């Protein structure tokens, strides 16, 4: 997966996770809230991985 795809997928997971998390809070659904928090975290990790891939690629391109 390219760094841009990782970044986009990460942000999408963060947004979806936050929506789930907030919906879980509003409906008092602990399971949905936990799923949302996990998906949000997954998105943060994906975005960070995409950022790292981009940094490595930039470093290599400069050589």
Image (tube, rainbow, N blue to C red):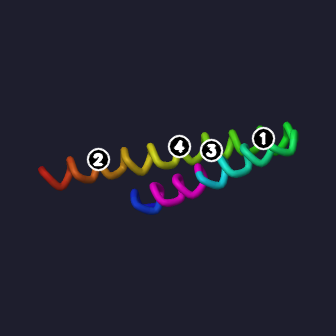
Q: CA distance from mark 3 to mark 2?
A: 24 Å
Q: Quadrant of residue 41?
A: top right
Tell me if label 3 and label 4 are in contact, CB under 8 Å.
yes
Q: Residue furthest front?
A: 26
The stretch in magenta equals 6-14
Q: CA distance from mark 3 to mark 1?
A: 10 Å
For mark 4, give the secondary structure: helix
Residue depth check, mark 3 versus mark 2: number of the one nearer the observer: 3
N-terminal label among 2 and 1: 1
Question: Residue 22: x percent and y percent?
Answer: 72, 44
N-terminal label among 1 and 4: 1
For mark 2, give the secondary structure: helix
The residue tagged 4 is: 44
The residue tagged 2 is: 56
Q: Is residue 21 left or right of residue 5?
A: right
Question: Residue 47: x percent and y percent?
Answer: 47, 48
Residue depth check, mark 2 versus mark 1: number of the one nearer the observer: 1
The residue tagged 3 is: 40
The residue tagged 1 is: 33
Magenta includes 2? no
For mark 1, give the secondary structure: helix
Q: Residue at position x 18%, y 55% from top?
A: 61
Question: Residue 14: x percent and y percent?
Answer: 58, 49
Can you tell which mark lies on residue 49? none
């Amino acid at each position: 997966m390219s760094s841009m795809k990782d970044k986009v997928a990460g942000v999408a997971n963060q947004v979806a996770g936050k929506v789930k998390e907030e919906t879980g809070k509003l409906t008092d659904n602990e399971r949905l809230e936990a799923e949302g928090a996990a998906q949000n975290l997954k998105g943060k990790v994906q975005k960070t991985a995409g950022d790292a891939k981009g940094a490595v690629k930039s470093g290599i391109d400069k050589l």
